[in-house]
Image (cartoon, grey):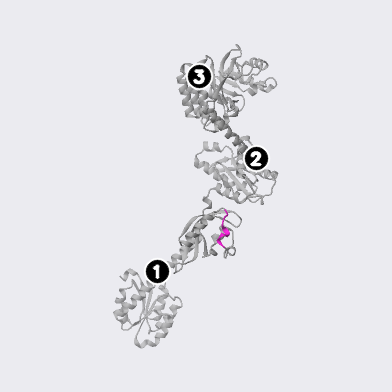
Amino acid sequence: MALEQALTLLYVEDDASVREATLPLLDHFFHTILIGIDGEDGFEKYLLHKEHIDLIITDITMPRRNGVEMINMIRKTNLEIPILVISAHTEFHYFIQTIDAGVDGYLLKPLKSEQFLKTLSKCIKKIHLHKEHVRVLTHLKEYENITDKSSIISRTNSRGIITYVNEKFCEISGYKVEELVGKAHNIIRHPDMPKAMFKEMWECIKERKETWQGVVKNRAKNGDAYYVKTTIQPILNAKGEVVEYIALRHDITAVMSDKKQLFDFLESNKLSVLILVQIEEYDTLEKFYDKSNVEKIQNAFGSTLLYLMPNYWGFQRVYTLENGLYAFAIDRRSCRATQEEIEEVLEKFLTNVREHSVKIDTIEYDISVVCSYTYGVFKIFEDAKIGIENALKEKKAIVYADGLSGLEYENALHNIETINTIKVALDSQNIISYFQPIVNNQTLKVEKYESLVRLIDAKGKILSPYYFLDIAKKGRYYTRITKIVLDNSFEVLRKTDKEISINLSMMDIERDDIRTYLYNLLDTYASMASRVVLELLESDDVKDFNAVLLFIETVKKRGVKIAIDDFGTGYSNFERLLMYQPDILKIDGSLIKHLQTNPNNRNIVETIVMFAQKQGMKTVAEFVENEIIFNLVKALEIDYSQGYAFGKPELF
């Protein structure tokens, strides 16, 4: 049993015969026994092994240095180590001196086993208690050091008054120790935090005397919000009364979304300057690179923005939002710049961005951005976000965005009204098709009709696509409208021997259900499919060119002709034209209606006609409104005309 304790004894005795008689008894209790043959030797052995010695047993009367002298010298270096004295009855005059020296017990010579075991057991028990006490204190000190370095710590009394804070508490809050100690803990409370949460917390720690945990939003001295995961432990006395509270917190601000932090800042600083920065062509980045690399590019670029922005006003950080969007925000009191001054700074910023390349591994990326800014009071983020959308749409580098959300709100109301009009029209079967004739310029006979969608509103008014189709594309009714137009067109195809042109958008072609619906109609009307012309409107939002080419190939195998609508303006592209291999080019009406007055239009139309003839394509002139325009169109050798000169769109 004794050996398991692994204790080390320093035994100091000058009488060799006594040592020989005592050592067998001591061996049962100690793993290691160091021998000192007198007081001098004993002290030297102590100095040499003091880190390992657990107990000292010493005689008193010894040469060179007696036991009392040795004990006094040891006590100068260690007041805690247990010391037992073995003495004879004749040495009682030393007892007072040993008591003053702080010994832990006495053994009388000659040693009696019962007395020796009893005294030694008490002493060994004390040694183990002391070791455990030291171990616990050491661990507690280690835990305290680790906690103090990794956690934000405070202590408050039972009334919630701060009595202690550590350095990390001061760092994150911005307050000094003297500004916090003696104050109520609500000095750092953020006004956004609901009172109900603090009520529940106090019920937990004060009434129920339980540990409370939760996420708390605090406010630093400079007004910035920060988030901490908090644990509060009530400390009780022997009577079970709360004497103080210890709170440990961990800063989780970094893991809270930048968007939430930005909104918190804007909420706390009602009058702010907000600048949004958007990577242009972010969608292109996502198409060319995988998610991991796009994230690397976005993060690397975001980390440089604070250095690229001329920081006259003291921006502290960049908020990384979503999809290549970033934000700078600052209290208006810190930035009293005029609109012109802000734009001047943004111009410098854009120049810096253009001259900067983002480097990821061995690849460099040149990134261009657009900016919007606002320093309003209401819906500041909404304004700036709409400003970014306008900048991208209108190809502007900088947009001043104050008040744009109000305009957007009005547009939204109009869109909602239009969506409702569409729904009512669909439910009452008031989505109809008009048909406009297309004539052969040589024979002046009608050879085709274009199917044009119309909507009858609740008041019986006929609305053209201009008033509802783009809005329908943003909602869930567009597919239903397309299917109705297809049904109406194929129904008229059955009633006439002329060709029927049907408009399809790229959105229609990319939808599986629309393609399937059209294929089924073509199969049902297989004998008439050769009189179907599908007019494709070019756009820049084609997501999958291969899908478009496959669609064209599929319908052409069924005998369908392909026309490119509104060719000559917008997104017209001769290279893409060769890919589509259409049968017909419909020349945009904006070119045709000004042929008489604009020589440039005539040159463009001549080029289109020449190209179409060489490629074996037929041409159609839109917006032929009168005889003068018709004569010009015919002179340019355009094959067909469509316009009010030959007929308005009407029910068939």
Between disc 1 and disc 3, the foreground one is 3
Compared to residue 550, the image places residue 271 above or below, namely below
Mark 1 or 2 closer to N-term?
Answer: 1
Going by the numbered disc 1, the residue's amino acid type is Glu
> What segment carries the magenta color?
184-191
Q: Examine the image and state in which quarter residue 597 appears.
A: top right
Q: Is residue 540 visible?
A: no
Q: Examine the image and state in which quarter residue 436 appears.
A: top right
Q: Is residue 186 magenta?
A: yes
**Residue 10, percent across and down?**
37, 76
Classify mark 3: helix, strand or loop: helix
**Residue 54, percent across and down?**
38, 73
- Whole-number angstrom distance, CA of label 1 to CA of label 2: 71 Å
Pick the residue in front: 372 or 359: 372
Pick the residue in front: 506 or 302: 506
- Whole-number angstrom distance, CA of label 3 to CA of label 2: 49 Å
Compared to residue 204, the image places residue 398 above or below, namely above
Residue 491: which numbered mark, if any? 3
- Whole-number angstrom distance, CA of label 1 to CA of label 3: 96 Å
What residue sits right under mark 2 in the picture?
399
What residue sits right under mark 1 in the picture?
132
Left or right: 79 in relation to 34: right
Left or right: 383 in relation to 360: right
Mark 3 or 2 closer to N-term?
Answer: 2
Q: Examine the image and state in which quarter residue 369 appears.
A: top right
Between disc 1 and disc 2, the foreground one is 2
Q: Is residue 480 magenta?
A: no
